[in-house]
Amino acid sequence: MEVAVWDTYVTKKDGNIMHFDIIAPSSVKDTNVIYEYGKAYLKSKGEEGQPLTSKECRFCHVRSLQSQWEADILRQGYFILEMENCG
């Protein structure tokens, strides 16, 4: 399976920038679906309501699925790769 990587930078409520990738099957082309994945992640981190639009989230590239992402993608449709300030 090929997956699409969506590079995402969201300003947290404390002003810091969260950097994470939303990784979803490359067949998901609807950006609104991708943004909803990101919003669900933000909610899980206590950052519900922070903006997540094309300004914060952009398609980056397509790559092969890594095995450690597969369970989340099969279960919920996406995987979040935390990069910076996601804790």
Image (cartoon, helix red, strand yellow):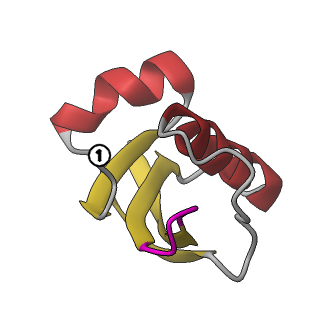
Q: In percent of the image, x 70 and y 83: which residue is there?
A: 55
Does the segment drawn in magenta span residue 15? yes
Residue farthest to the left?
Answer: 67
Left or right, residue 9 beside residue 47: left
Q: Position of residue 63 (x, y in %)?
A: 33, 63
Q: Position of residue 1 (x, y in %)?
A: 38, 42
Q: Nearer the viewer, residue 53 or 12?
A: 12
Decide if residue 33 is in sight here.
yes
Vertical arrangement, residue 46 with respect to residue 10, above or below? above
Decide if residue 28 is in sight here.
no
Secondary structure mostly seen in the magenta stretch: loop
Q: In percent of the image, x 43 and y 52: which residue is there?
A: 3
Q: Which residue is mark 1?
A: 65
Q: Nearer the viewer, residue 5 or 49?
A: 49
- Label 1: state its secondary structure: loop
Q: In percent of the image, x 73 and y 77: which residue is there?
A: 54
Does the segment drawn in magenta span residue 70? no
Q: Residues within 10 Å of mark 1 (few under 14, many from 20)?
A: some
Tell me which segment is drawn in magenta: 12-16
Residue farthest to the front?
Answer: 14
Vertical arrangement, residue 59 with respect to residue 41, above or below? below
Q: Position of residue 35 (x, y in %)?
A: 71, 54
Residue farthest to the bottom?
Answer: 55
Left or right, residue 39 beside residue 82: right
Q: Position of residue 43 (x, y in %)?
A: 60, 37
Left or right, residue 35 beside residue 5: right
| Amino acid marked by disc 1 | Leu
